[in-house]
Image: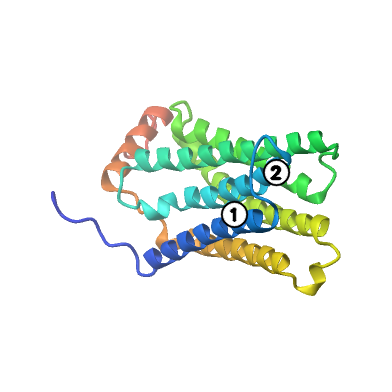
């Protein structure tokens, strides 16, 4: 009925979303505190350029990517096209921020004469970024451009959903490897003595894992999935008819 309030969100969903955002903001604050207190801060045109890398990767590949994945759970009653556009926009922003972080680490390595792409962290991190970019391009092509047919979108959607969650997990794993690598490079001799920098960095790692678990839980709850609106069902049927040559009753034209 016109003017009726939208249905309430499922019990517990709002609480988990709030917790995820508090965790996300806390892990960003922890990253900034670590870099500012123990690594000298962040600056582009200086020896501190390397520190741009961990800040951007946590912001882009974890926090923004996680929020982009939550869009379909949070905006449950908005128009599907608007929700889809926001989903793509947040993923695109995450890619841009991550690209800045990648450029920073390559330029820092070149300045300091450090070799590139030799560690497990760099392999996993680059794989996560390249696959994330490919995932975004495929999603844009299948779901935002008008060329893909209804059946093609339906067949690709399960792969898109699976690899979205898998790449989010891979991104967090790459961050954990990067934290460990930085600690071993910088405080190898004192790390085992529970020095404050090591404790803070370990806490950041725990926050990353916790953020990932909370987001993953929200995403995998079937009863928290976004329900299709009535007008979307009608539009889907019209789109299927136009692209597949089927009548609303399912017969071929």
Q: Is residue 253 left or right of residue 204?
A: left
Q: Nearer the viewer, mark 1 or mark 2?
A: 2
Relative to 211, does residue 107 appear above or below in the rendering? above
Give 154 or 35, whichever is nearer the viewer.
Answer: 35
Decide: is 227 above or below 195: above
Q: Residues within 10 Å of mark 2 (few under 14, many from 20)?
A: some
- The structure residue drawn at horizontal position 68% and vertical position 46%, both measured from the top left corner, is 51
Q: Is 40 above or below relative to 140?
A: below
Of the pair 210 and 159, the residue shown nearer to us: 210
Q: Identify the residue shown where x is 82% and y is 55%.
A: 185
Q: CA distance from mark 1 to mark 2?
A: 13 Å
On residue 48, which mark appears?
A: 2
Q: What residue is at 47 percent from the left and 26 percent from the top?
A: 147
Is disc 2 placed on a helix, strand or loop? helix
Q: Give the mark, 1 or 2, whose residue is nearer the N terminus.
A: 1
Q: Which of the colour schemes (rainbow, by chain, secondary structure, one colour) is used?
A: rainbow
Image position, residue 102 (x, y; %): 68, 38
Residue for point 54% across, 52% down: 63
Mark 1: which secondary structure? helix
Q: Is residue 145 visible?
A: yes
Residue 169 placement (x, y as % from top left): 63, 55
Choose top left, top right, bottom left or bottom right for residue 7. bottom left
Label 1 crowd bin: few (<14), some (14–19), many (20+), radius 10 Å: some
Residue 162 shows in the view: no
Q: Which residue is mark 1?
A: 32
Point out residue 52 in the picture as x, y percentages from the top left corner: 65, 43
* Furthest-bottom residue in this view: 193
Marks 1 and 2: CB-CB under 8 Å?
A: no
Please identify the residue farthest to the left as the structure is shown: 2
Estimate the x, y position of residue 148 in percent, counting from the top left: 48, 30
Which image quarter holds the C terminus?
top left
């Amino acid at each position: 009925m016109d003017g009726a309030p939208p249905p309430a969100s499922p019990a517990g969903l709002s609480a988990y979303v709030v917790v995820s955002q508090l965790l996300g903001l806390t892990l960003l604050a922890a990253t900034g505190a670590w870099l500012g207190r123990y690594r000298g801060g962040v600056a582009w045109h200086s020896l501190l350029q390397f520190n741009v890398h961990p800040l951007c990767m946590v912001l882009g590949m974890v926090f923004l990517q996680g929020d982009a994945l939550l869009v379909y759970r949070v905006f449950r009653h908005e128009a599907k096209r608007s929700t889809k556009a926001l989903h793509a926009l947040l993923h695109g922003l995450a890619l841009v921020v991550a690209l800045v972080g990648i450029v920073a680490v390559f330029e820092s390595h070149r300045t300091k004469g450090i070799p590139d792409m030799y560690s497990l962290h760099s392999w996993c991190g680059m794989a996560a970024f390249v696959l994330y970019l490919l995932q975004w391009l495929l999603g844009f092509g299948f779901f935002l451009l008008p060329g893909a047919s209804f059946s093609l979108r339906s067949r690709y959607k399960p792969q898109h959903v699976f690899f979205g969650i898998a790449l989010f997990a891979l991104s967090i794993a790459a961050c954990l490897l990067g934290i460990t690598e930085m600690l071993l490079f910088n405080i190898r001799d004192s790390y085992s003595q529970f020095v404050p920098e090591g404790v803070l960095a370990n806490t950041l790692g725990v926050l990353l894992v916790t953020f990932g678990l909370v987001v993953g839980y929200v995403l995998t709850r079937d009863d928290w999935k976004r329900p299709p609106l009535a007008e979307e069902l009608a539009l889907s049927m019209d789109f299927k008819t136009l692209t597949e040559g089927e009548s609303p009753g399912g017969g071929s034209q």
